[in-house]
Image (cartoon, rainbow, N blue to C red):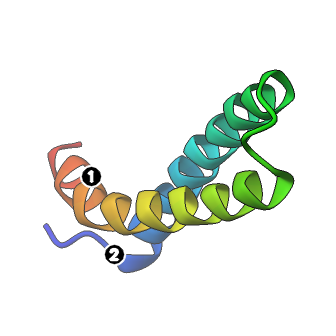
Amino acid sequence: MAVKFMHTFVFSSISALVVGALFYVLSAGRSVVSEAYTTTDTNLGTVFVLLLALIIGLSVWPRILEKV
């Protein structure tokens, strides 16, 4: 059974948002403790993690959805 791209994209987007939000919360907490990290570092790191999680999710979710 072929998995539709829209289902894969939705699941990948949701998982990427969760991972991105988790990274943002953890890195924002870290930047409060240490002055070595700025707000720009936190924001750009979050964008990087979000895009990376989206790409990885697009390759992993079709295999998971085929088994369900």
Residue type at tag 2: Lys
Left or right: residue 6 versus residue 65 is: right
Q: Quadrant of residue 61?
A: bottom left
Q: Nearer the viewer, residue 1 or 32?
A: 32
Residue 55 position, x and y percent, is 37, 69
In the image, residue 4 sits, relative to residue 50, either above or below, namely below
Q: Quadrant of residue 25?
A: top right
**Residue extending furthest top?**
33
Q: Which quarter of the figure is the N terminus placed in? A: bottom left
Residue type at tag 1: Leu
Circle 1 sits on which residue?
65
Q: Nearer the viewer, residue 1 or 10?
A: 10
Left or right: residue 1 versus residue 56 is: left
Q: Nearer the viewer, residue 14 or 51?
A: 51
Q: Nearer the viewer, residue 50 or 2?
A: 50
Left or right: residue 23 versus residue 51 is: right
Residue displayed at 24% across by 55% down:
60
Q: Which mark is residue 25?
A: none
Give the spatial CA distance, label 1 vs label 2.
Answer: 9 Å
Circle 2 sits on which residue?
4
